[in-house]
């Protein structure tokens, strides 16, 4: 603790901070540009100058950059000092000399840090009469737009992109007035975190391109607190809606989870909710060949209830991308014995193993923020950048934290970013990765191995044995692996807080058991370690806690006619199992009822399709991979802009169907009621009641506003439909209003913040006003509750060591490789993601490719038992010979672990999935 | 007393006389609608969207008029032309809500939205008072004859490259070694 005096007032602050972050934590407004709470200080912009005095009697003082000055005890500073104020307004006037006078046509306007700071310092008239510096722009891919003229050279972009996210293809070129921030040549930004540039950049140099075509100012968007649905990490987001479409995903600060950054799949993968081909009314067809007729809600419910009532037995197929509430209502509708999770058996076995391990291995699951505090990491069988990108970014910070540690030994404060980096250079905390191919974190890893899943598991078992001799040893281990295992074990044991990461990406229970053994060994040696297990989809963890049969079971029940009706909830079965098997089951069933928000392949087989709400149109609860139950709230009412739509949350549909089946009147159902029912039914999920405040939550007697108070066009946006405005939609489920009326301030602590705004702070930097200290936690506590708590007890090691992988002569083992772009069911239906994903490829080792004569780019056909696909070949230096990597999200006919044949693509065979040509531009005019 | 009665009577008669003389003055009341209205040019009536001196739409869909509108009766959507210009994909004013305060005109950074001295907007059906862009857009520059936003702003559009706006230097070349 330190005591500082600001403008004559005394404050107690954290002495390890710099003055700028100390002042901001106190709620004092100091303008700044180059400093960022997650990236420390470099003192590049000179905007945060304050007057510092030697002691209480000093009247002269001197100007210092508050971001580069420690908040040492007994500091005397003045923010309001006239000289400091004049200095700051001169700095901004000078930064604005070259600013291009294009705020009206700038996609940053309205949430622009530069606008905020210009207003804060009072600069409002241009005095400089001379010429402005200009720049040419670059094409940077489908996600990020570039307008270099707006640059104020704060260097935040390259500091984030290179120093924080480990990207290599964005840099600062030239110097002084010849400066340029961009790529060495036009092209797609390679980092999977490039989207954060749009929030990191304090002006409009980098803006959200997916939003540009139908751009809307921040003040005109309707927001709600939401949870990213594109993977299992559970990042907090704020989707913004206008005229019935989601326009942008903004990062929502959660001090324990994502904090300031999102991955590109989460930020730009929202396009599927805006698709024009989405089902918006119930559709009915008597036979599969018929064209569907659209029905109204009551007719559809009557029809659905009649069909289900007359069925002998109804199977329910749930979904790991649907909320707990929807899955629970489905389970209630069909009965527990008839409920399938909709997850293929292989993945379900992995999920169950992970669920058990999280409770019985003796190690806690770290939060995303806590991952950064570990000082040795072992990753087995996960390419984190592809399967849980935001976790990958956190692991990268854990590796970088070695620099801070070195700096600490020499009394260099952690926030002094350039000094810390210069001192630390390339020293990282040990990170070990075993994965079949190269991974996105190899550049900071101490060692990485390209191994087959079985060999990864064997390495894990060996590490466990090396840590604790009580763990089962591995038979017939080769010398290199034994040494590697001993090395890893030694490094993990030498660390203060080791972290073990595994997961289900490779579909191998053996890998998960191996990870579990390492965790148990660390627990037995009483290490303060953690275990993180990566799941595939947004609610995989929650659904595993609910339980249910596998998808194969459900299909068998149908095709063997033990059941004649099926209700499928938000699940495209074709993504999970081979099409032939699904068709066999669905054709046998007399009634197929599908609820979904996408026109999937499964939807085409539905007798009755009910349009479900996507995450932006409904409420629900998801459990993230760290076991955090988090609520997402409805962003907008689709009927307000498009009165013809009949979209409802799946749990509402299923509740009404259940009432109809039993010939009850459809009673009131609200979110709080459904959550209560889930909590009572599943004791392990009981805490989800506290994941977010209920519908009766009020601040100063007010509900919370979804719209900023400047929201415009309320009396015109719907006037073309009817000039008489309807009542604003009411929300019985949440404490939010579909209106600008309601509380939106920062001064009363609250967990659920729809959008960050504070007077004078329109940009995402406004989050500093909502946190207890800069970069800390939300003042009301971070949203969500943790459900996965280790159970004390003595648990045995797993001892089923798998045999080593051996390449075979004419068959190859499939490993399905997760892909960040195009690898998941929903975001791969969004245009920008399709463009960014580029063509799908098979991954082969160079040896195999040479043997097959399949050099890079040549097309090969993979044929398994259930079918095959033809794709061009990419060579991977790490992939062991005898394996073939198949990209996830393309086809379900090939499963991990299956042995397949490879052959040359003789004739133009069928295509699985669409892979648009990669985007190339050759505008010679744009440089550099 | 007598004096008061006398002055009172005279005052009354004088007033009657003055009022009577008004019958011979020129009439202030217009026989609207038989006679046309002549409102001053700065009168705040029907709102129009103007074009720049080159005949292109001036509105860049920045949304400032909409946010300035105290009754929130303006709604629009940004779109982008082939040449890179921003334009309103739709632009709607609900004149049944408009109070003709002129805040939109004050907020407009491109002189696109202007109020005109036309007040003849009566309709029998309220729905007819919802004006779309084709009802609002006129063919001239309105009151501001010269302003051309893209000639001032640094954003490049087709026909006006980087460095060609007012007071702009040629784009920097980071590959040069010259000072």
Image (spheres, coloured by chain):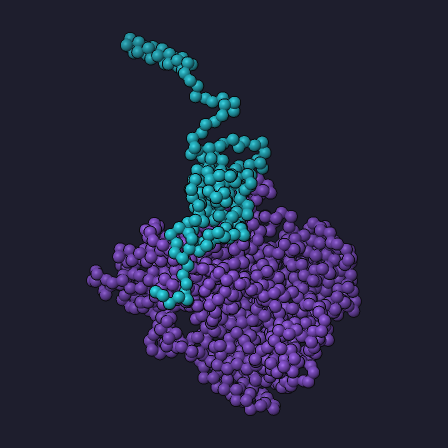
Q: Position of residue A822 (x, y in %)?
A: 60, 66
Inspect this view and state whether residue A803 appears.
Answer: yes
Could you tell me how many numbered marks the image carries? 0
Q: Is residue A576 left or right of residue A219?
A: right
- Residue A881, placed above or below residue A676: below
| Rendered position, B5 above or below B167 | above
Q: Which chain is purple?
A: A
Q: Residue at x 51, y 72 (%)?
A: A392
- Residue A451 on image: x %, y %: 58, 82
Rendered colour, chain B: cyan
User: At x 65% / y 48%, what residue is drawn?
Assistant: A644
Quadrant showing the C terminus of chain A: bottom left
- Position of B91 compared to A81: left or right? right
Q: Answer with the quarter of the image where residue A355 lies.
A: bottom right
Q: Is residue A752 visible?
A: no
Q: Which one is nearer the viewer's eye here, A351 or A305?
A: A351
Quadrant position of residue A275: bottom right
- Point out residue A667 in the picture as x, y percentages from the top left corner: 65, 52
């Amino acid at each position: 603790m330190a005591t500082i005096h600001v403008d004559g007032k005394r404050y107690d602050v954290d002495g390890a901070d710099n003055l700028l972050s100390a002042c901001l934590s106190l709620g004092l407004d100091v303008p700044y540009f180059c400093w960022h709470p997650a990236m420390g200080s470099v003192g590049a912009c000179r905007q945060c100058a304050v007057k510092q005095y030697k002691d209480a009697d000093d009247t002269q003082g001197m100007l210092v950059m508050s971001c580069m000055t420690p908040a040492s005890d007994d500091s005397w500073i003045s923010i309001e000092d006239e000289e400091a104020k004049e200095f700051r307004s001169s700095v901004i006037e000078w930064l604005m000399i070259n600013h291009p006078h294009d705020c009206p046509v700038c996609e940053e306007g309205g949430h622009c840090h530069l606008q905020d700071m210009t207003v804060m310092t009072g600069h409002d008239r241009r005095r400089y009469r001379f010429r402005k510096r200009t720049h040419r722009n670059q094409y940077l891919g489908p996600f990020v737009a570039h307008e270099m003229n707006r640059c104020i050279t704060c260097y935040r972009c390259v500091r984030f992109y290179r120093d924080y996210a480990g990207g290599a293809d964005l840099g600062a070129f030239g110097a002084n007035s010849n400066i340029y921030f961009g790529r060495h040549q036009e092209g797609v930004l390679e980092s999977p975190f490039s989207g954060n540039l749009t929030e990191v950049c304090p002006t409009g140099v980098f803006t959200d391109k997916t939003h540009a075509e139908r751009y809307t100012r921040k003040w005109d968007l309707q927001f709600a607190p939401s949870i990213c649905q594109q993977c299992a990490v559970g990042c907090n987001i704020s989707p913004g809606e206008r005229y019935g479409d989601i326009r942008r995903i903004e990062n929502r600060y959660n001090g324990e989870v994502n904090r300031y950054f999102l991955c590109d799949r989460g930020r730009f993968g929202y396009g599927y909710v805006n698709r024009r081909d989405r089902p918006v009314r119930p559709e009915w067809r008597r036979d599969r060949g018929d064209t569907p007729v659209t029905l109204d809600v009551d007719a559809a419910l009557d029809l659905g209830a009649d069909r289900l009532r007359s069925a002998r037995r109804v199977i329910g197929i749930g979904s790991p991308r649907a909320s707990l509430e929807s899955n629970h209502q489905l389970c209630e509708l069909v009965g527990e014995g008839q409920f399938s999770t909709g997850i293929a058996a292989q993945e379900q076995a992995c999920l169950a193993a992970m669920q058990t391990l999280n409770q019985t291995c003796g190690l806690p699951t770290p939060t995303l923020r806590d991952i950064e505090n570990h000082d040795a990491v072992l990753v087995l069988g996960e390419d984190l950048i592809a399967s849980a990108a935001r976790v990958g970014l956190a692991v990268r910070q854990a590796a970088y934290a070695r620099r801070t540690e070195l700096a600490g030994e020499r009394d260099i404060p952690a926030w002094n970013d350039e000094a810390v980096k210069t001192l630390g250079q390339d020293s990282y905390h040990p990170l070990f990765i075993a994965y079949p191919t190269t991974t996105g974190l190899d550049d900071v890893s101490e060692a990485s191995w390209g191994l087959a899943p079985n060999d990864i598991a064997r390495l894990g078992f060996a590490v466990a044995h090396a840590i604790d001799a009580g763990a089962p040893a591995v038979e017939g281990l080769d010398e290199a692996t034994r040494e590697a295992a001993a090395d890893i074990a030694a490094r993990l044991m030498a660390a203060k807080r080791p972290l073990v990461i595994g997961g289900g990406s490779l579909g191998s229970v053996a890998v998960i058991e191996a990870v579990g053994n390492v965790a148990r060994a660390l627990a037995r040696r009483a290490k303060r370690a953690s275990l993180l297990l990566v799941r595939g989809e947004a609610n995989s963890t929650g659904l595993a806690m609910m339980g249910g049969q596998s998808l194969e079971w459900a299909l068998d029940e149908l095709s063997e006619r033990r059941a004649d009706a099926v209700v499928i909830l938000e699940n495209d079965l074709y993504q999970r199992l081979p099409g032939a098997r699904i068709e066999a089951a669905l054709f046998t069933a007399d009634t197929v009822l599908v609820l979904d928000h996408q026109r999937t392949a499964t939807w085409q087989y539905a007798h009755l399709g009910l349009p479900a709400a996507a995450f932006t149109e409904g409420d629900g609860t998801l459990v993230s991979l760290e076991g955090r139950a988090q609520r997402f709230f409805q962003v907008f009412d689709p009927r307000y802009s498009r009165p013809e739509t009949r979209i409802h949350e799946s749990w509402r549909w299923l509740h009404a169907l259940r009432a109809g089946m039993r010939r009850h009147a459809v009673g009131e159902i609200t979110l709080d009621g459904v959550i209560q029912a889930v909590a009572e039914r599943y004791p392990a999920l009981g805490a989800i009641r506290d994941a977010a405040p209920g519908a009766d939550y009020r601040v100063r007697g007010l509900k919370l506003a979804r719209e900023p108070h400047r929201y415009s066009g309320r009396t015109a946006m719907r006037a073309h439909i009817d000039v008489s405005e309807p009542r604003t939609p009411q929300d019985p489920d949440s404490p939010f209003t579909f209106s600008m009326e309601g509380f939106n301030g920062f001064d009363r602590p609250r967990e659920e913040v729809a959008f960050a705004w504070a007077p004078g702070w329109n940009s995402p930097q406004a989050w500093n006003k909502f946190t207890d200290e800069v970069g800390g936690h939300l003042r009301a506590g971070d949203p969500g509750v943790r459900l996965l708590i280790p159970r004390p007890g003595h648990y045995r090691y797993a001892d089923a060591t798998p045999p080593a992988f051996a390449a075979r002569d004419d068959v190859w083992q499939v490993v399905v490789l997760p892909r960040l772009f195009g690898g998941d069911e929903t975001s791969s239906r969004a245009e920008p993601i399709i463009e960014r994903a580029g063509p799908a490829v098979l991954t082969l080792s160079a040896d195999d490719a040479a043997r097959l004569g399949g050099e890079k780019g040549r097309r090969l056909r993979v044929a398994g038992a259930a079918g095959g696909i033809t794709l061009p070949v990419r060579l991977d230096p790490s992939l062991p010979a005898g394996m073939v990597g198949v990209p996830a999200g393309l086809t379900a006919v090939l499963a991990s672990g299956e042995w397949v044949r490879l052959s040359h693509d003789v004739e133009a065979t069928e295509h699985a999935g669409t892979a648009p040509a990669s985007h190339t531009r050759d505008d010679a005019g744009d440089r550099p | 007393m007598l004096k008061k009665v006398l002055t009172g009577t005279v005052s009354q008669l004088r007033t009657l006389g003055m009022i009577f003389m008004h019958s011979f003055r020129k009439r202030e009341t217009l026989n609207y609608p038989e006679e046309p209205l002549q409102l001053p040019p700065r009168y705040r009536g029907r709102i129009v969207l103007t074009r720049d001196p080159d005949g292109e739409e001036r509105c860049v869909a920045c949304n400032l008029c909409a946010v300035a509108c105290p009754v929130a009766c303006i709604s629009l959507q940004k779109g982008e032309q082939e040449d890179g210009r921003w334009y309103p994909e739709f632009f709607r004013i609900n004149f049944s809500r408009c109070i003709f305060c002129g805040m939109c005109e004050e907020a407009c950074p491109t002189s696109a939205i202007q109020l005109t001295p036309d007040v003849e907007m009566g309709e029998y059906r309220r729905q007819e008072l919802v004006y779309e862009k084709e009802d609002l857009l006129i063919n001239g520059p309105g009151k501001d004859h010269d302003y051309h936003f893209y000639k001032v702003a640094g954003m490049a559009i087709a026909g006006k490259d980087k460095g060609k706006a007012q007071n702009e230097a040629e784009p920097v070349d980071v590959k040069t070694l010259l000072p």
